Image (spheres, helix red, strand yellow):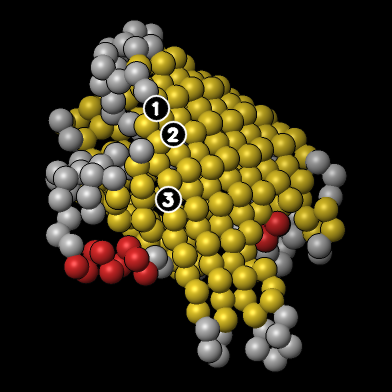
Amino acid sequence: MKYIITPIALAIAMSTALPASASIFMYDDASDLDTEAKKDWDASAELGLLYTSGNTKTETLRSKLSAARDYENWRHKGVIDYYRAEQENQTTGVTATTGDKLFISAQSNYKFSPESRSSLFVFTSYEEDKFSGYEYQGTVAVGYGARYRYSESLFADYEIGPGYSLNKPIINGVVQEQESSAILRIAGNLVWDVSKNSKFNALAATEIGEVNTKSRAEVSISANVNSSLALKFSISGTHNSFLDDPSKEKLDTETAVTLVYSF
């Protein structure tokens, strides 16, 4: 499990009472915006850093850029998520990369009317993570989406539709030929404004293919430090049901404490 701790964030959290809530967006997030008044994009940048020295020297970086817009008949959202970790061998002095992952996704939903809960979506994603057993994995999917509001502070998005995936497996360090497969994408996202100061978010998405089923899940809770900064704690995981390289783990998890700046 990978841990990313933001010292600045922890210091602020310990010394500051957390007021006023902020909009936090993540991969497959659902923003409940005012479709009549909101015309501009909501964007946020997320950063977590970890440095250690002494008997163990490591450097870890977690960064994420997100954007969302909900206006009239359209809802758009996208994310760029990057993670990198390096560790120095104390005997040889050689620094080795122990993690290097890039994930990009974009989605547009066309609502049947500005007030409609139903929509048609187009989703695409691309991931590079050579430590996962794949040089890259890409997905395109289209289908039906629905948003259900259970209370003023709680709503959820549900989506299902067919798609297509492309990937390049890595076996014993050797990149293989590109593979492709038809998939069925199923996704859900729950957003709960716990209070004026905090927000809970949970998402799960699975892409069922002919050989491999890839699933992603994330649970997070965030609280405002001020009108622009928020402290976020998240636990996420990615699972592949089949890997060509049996030496690789099927499940990768990540636990992070980060600062989020909204603009």
Checking the image for residue 46, the label placed there is: 3
Q: Which residue is mark 1?
A: 41
For the residues labelled 1 and 2, say whether their Cβ atoms are less than 8 Å apart: yes
Badge 2 amino acid: Ala
Q: Which residue is mark 2?
A: 67
Residue 53 percent coordinates (x, y): 52, 84
Q: Residues within 10 Å of mark 2 (few under 14, many from 20)?
A: many
Residue for point 42% across, 50% down: 46
Residue 263 against residue 107 in the figure, above or below? below
Residue for point 33% across, 31% down: 31
Q: Which callout, 3 or 1, points at the residue further toward the start of the chain?
A: 1
Residue for point 84% across, 50% down: 176
Q: Is residue 85 visible?
A: yes
Residue 23 against residue 251 in the figure, above or below? above
Q: Residues within 10 Å of mark 1 (few under 14, many from 20)?
A: few
Badge 1 amino acid: Trp
Q: Is residue 146 visible?
A: no
Residue 43 against residue 15 in the figure, above or below? above
Instruction: From the viewer's side, name the closer residue of 167 and 9.
Output: 9
Q: Find the distance from the CA under tag 1 to the CA under tag 2.
A: 7 Å
